[in-house]
Amino acid sequence: MSDRILATYLIETRYPLEQAAAAMAGEQSSGTFRAIPGETPELLARYGARVERIEEIGEAEGESLPFSRPPKAEASARPRRAHVTISWNLENTGTILSSVWSTVLGNLFELHHFSALRLLELDLPDAFTEAYPGPAFAVEGTRRLTGVHGRPIVGTIVKPSVGLTPEATAELADRMISAGLDFLKDDELMGDPPHSPFARRFEAVMQVIDRHADRTGRKAMYAVNISGDMDAMRRQLDVIEKRGGTAAMLVLNSVGLSGVIEIRRHASVALHGHRAGWGLYDRSPALGMSYRAYQKFWRLAGVDHLHVNGLSNKFCEPDDSVIASARECLTPMFRRPDRPDTVMPVFSSAQSAVQAEETYRLLGSEDLIYCAGGGIVAHPDGAEAGVRSIHEAWQAAKQGIPAKDFARSHPALAAALQAFG
Amino acid sequence: MSDRILATYLIETRYPLEQAAAAMAGEQSSGTFRAIPGETPELLARYGARVERIEEIGEAEGESLPFSRPPKAEASARPRRAHVTISWNLENTGTILSSVWSTVLGNLFELHHFSALRLLELDLPDAFTEAYPGPAFAVEGTRRLTGVHGRPIVGTIVKPSVGLTPEATAELADRMISAGLDFLKDDELMGDPPHSPFARRFEAVMQVIDRHADRTGRKAMYAVNISGDMDAMRRQLDVIEKRGGTAAMLVLNSVGLSGVIEIRRHASVALHGHRAGWGLYDRSPALGMSYRAYQKFWRLAGVDHLHVNGLSNKFCEPDDSVIASARECLTPMFRRPDRPDTVMPVFSSAQSAVQAEETYRLLGSEDLIYCAGGGIVAHPDGAEAGVRSIHEAWQAAKQGIPAKDFARSHPALAAALQAFG
């Protein structure tokens, strides 16, 4: 890896590709719309962004996004698509993640040259590992905290998302942990509302968790959602740590980069990164950024778990994209074996026992958190059977036995396949 | 205004509109993908999001975004477009802006029902004014700090964006303030890099500002970019305040909501909100959110100035959109005359003396910050003449004299119209 920041984009433009790429490099480094007196050749050579590579990949049928302004001479040509790699001297930004965000994204999406522009890949120099801590727990630490080895961590999202009292939440947690649940998290819509204040909800659930831990020797992890203003998040983090909690959840896009970085510096529990709002970055193939690039910011900031949707999810994301995202989470970012920075991919969104077999087959790893909401509480034989059905599905997957065969001797799994299949 | 949070969206779907709107309401409140035991009618009535209004606006030619999954029965129908208003009980979120962000945006963009979904309007109950301070300086405070009344605040973005030494930056500031500049800001790419560390750059520019203030009685405002990690931002804010600075700049999308809120609580200087990355929200008409909705989060968080591009800008944004955004900044958000919450719109991006006349004609207000980078430093007679040309252009606009007529007796303006027109 070089000592430059490297970013690769998909672009679509009617400009000559070299000219379009130069516009990107100019906008995101020393340039303005006019050549100006202070912009000496020495300064440009040192601080100007550099176009490293342009690879044309074809013509587009038409413009993917409106409002671009093609040069007059080429107005009738079809836009062309290309992959463009641009690099920056690390001196432009220093190792400040907010500055990197402004530099590799910034005004690029608005440049009039482009009818599509999307960040595909981002490579940061190892110097960033000196500035940011990365995940504190990562995969192994999460296993240590939950006492779960040799299989996925099985979790739930408390449902209904909004409206349960703290007591009802704890009662639900009790039933599911009794049945073997390893992990539970708030829905991203659940924060610190009047009907279920953080402190009461957290305490009620922790009493349940402790009671079961005394019995089983394993402490279920509760990723309680602390996303909010900084003061409140810090206070809540203190409560979690003093009470023996092992995790906190952050809605990454709602809190933002500086907030997440600050919480990581303050925290001694695992940080569960929810990506609600991800559609803003990914829903248009002509805009935004890939998960591959996106997740690097949050891992470097220090999140331990990252959501990746799940197979056959309730959203738009195709299965191959889900698996590719999970693989990214499990791929090291830097050449620092002393600093593990892979994180737990979190499978969530319309998951149930049904998808376990295929998830294991496609991912080839059991390092994941497998979360089901409706797939547990809406199990026809109750939430306890819901939890059991998921454990059974993963046992079958790991032993290489088709779920429908395993289900013959496992009624919870059989009922889940019937209800959710 | 009700005590509910109201959000209006543009949607495009092949589902029956009622069903599509119900999917939005379900996903963003108590729902999961299955009806579940704890979801009682009482709970749904209280905490379920409510579809307030559906207004069909026509058919789309085809799907604006890929990957939606239409119901099989209607797969051949053209998608329909509608405006949908959804409301939430304030009890769902409490007055926590991050929770609101998760609730009104969240997973909506990813729902498989939609081939377009965009947040158009957001109305928050007045209760939010108790939880968040809003702008500390707003329009009047910014005028007081700069000593500029009865005309726009004329500013520059220091260019080249990256690469100037602190001394070169100060030298440039000196020339421009001599010529009557009121305001200067860092480029959003300039943070705290090794070649121009925050502390040295800020001190060098402040010495220039103080020297001119002694002479003129007016202190130019320097919106120095502090966007970064929280600790660094707080330290830099302390330096700014102790040294008598009057502003700090935040790249809103890079810092994020919680970080900006925290800085506002810590700050006693004006906060200059840069929207780099805005294209993520706005570049596709089928996705994201309107500026009308976007700016409300940041104003409530407490930013005093907000970027709106400028007429004939170097980006994709059409002029009518720029003016509409500026009008939003100047429109009160809440019914609290005791708490002014309008903010200074910042016109920036390829601006020069050329656009002043039309900007004043279309906006009908002089409450704005008018920033030029290349339009000042690339003026054929130098940066000083660049500043003068913009003052002259605004004098002409305010007196109702066409710029080209005014230019006959004002050579700096004449040269600017020639060079940039």
Image (cartoon, coloured by chain):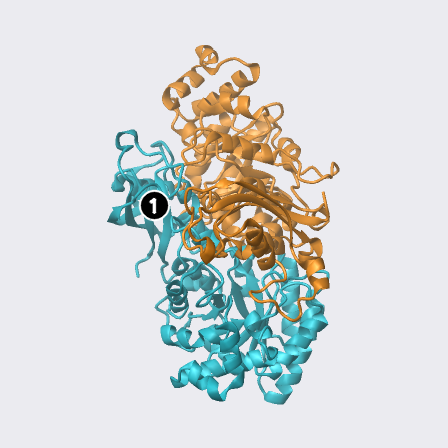
Chain colours: A cyan, B orange
Instruction: Kindly indicate the quadrant of the structure image that contains residue A130.
Output: bottom left
Instruction: Kindly indicate the quadrant of the structure image that contains residue A2.
Output: bottom left
> Looking at the image, can residue B48 be seen?
yes
Q: Is residue A293 above or below residue B57?
A: below
- Residue B19 in percent (x, y) is at 56, 54
Observer-nearest residue: B216 or B153? B153
Quarter of the N terminus of chain A within the rendering: bottom left
Instruction: Kindly indicate the quadrant of the structure image that contains residue A249.
Output: bottom right
Observer-nearest residue: A272 or A393? A393
Return the residue at label 1. Answer: A47
> Looking at the image, can residue B380 be seen?
no
User: As shown in the figure, which amino acid type bears the numbered disc 1?
Assistant: Tyr
Q: Chain of mark 1?
A: A
- Residue A155 in percent (x, y) is at 54, 75
> Is residue A59 found left or right of A278 in the rendered image?
left
Residue located at (52% from left, 77% from top)? A416
> Is residue A110 found left or right of B292 in the rendered image?
left
- Residue A81 in percent (x, y) is at 29, 46
- Residue A412 in percent (x, y) is at 54, 83
Observer-nearest residue: A134 or B388? A134
Is disc 1 surrounded by few (<14), some (14 to 19) or many (20+) residues within 10 Å?
Answer: many
Judged from this view, the residue extending furthest toward the right is B338
Residue located at (48% from left, 50% from top)? B14
Judged from this view, the residue extending furthest toward the front is B73
Q: Is residue B42 above or below residue B19?
A: below
Q: Secondary structure at mark 1?
A: helix
* Number of dots carrying numbers: 1
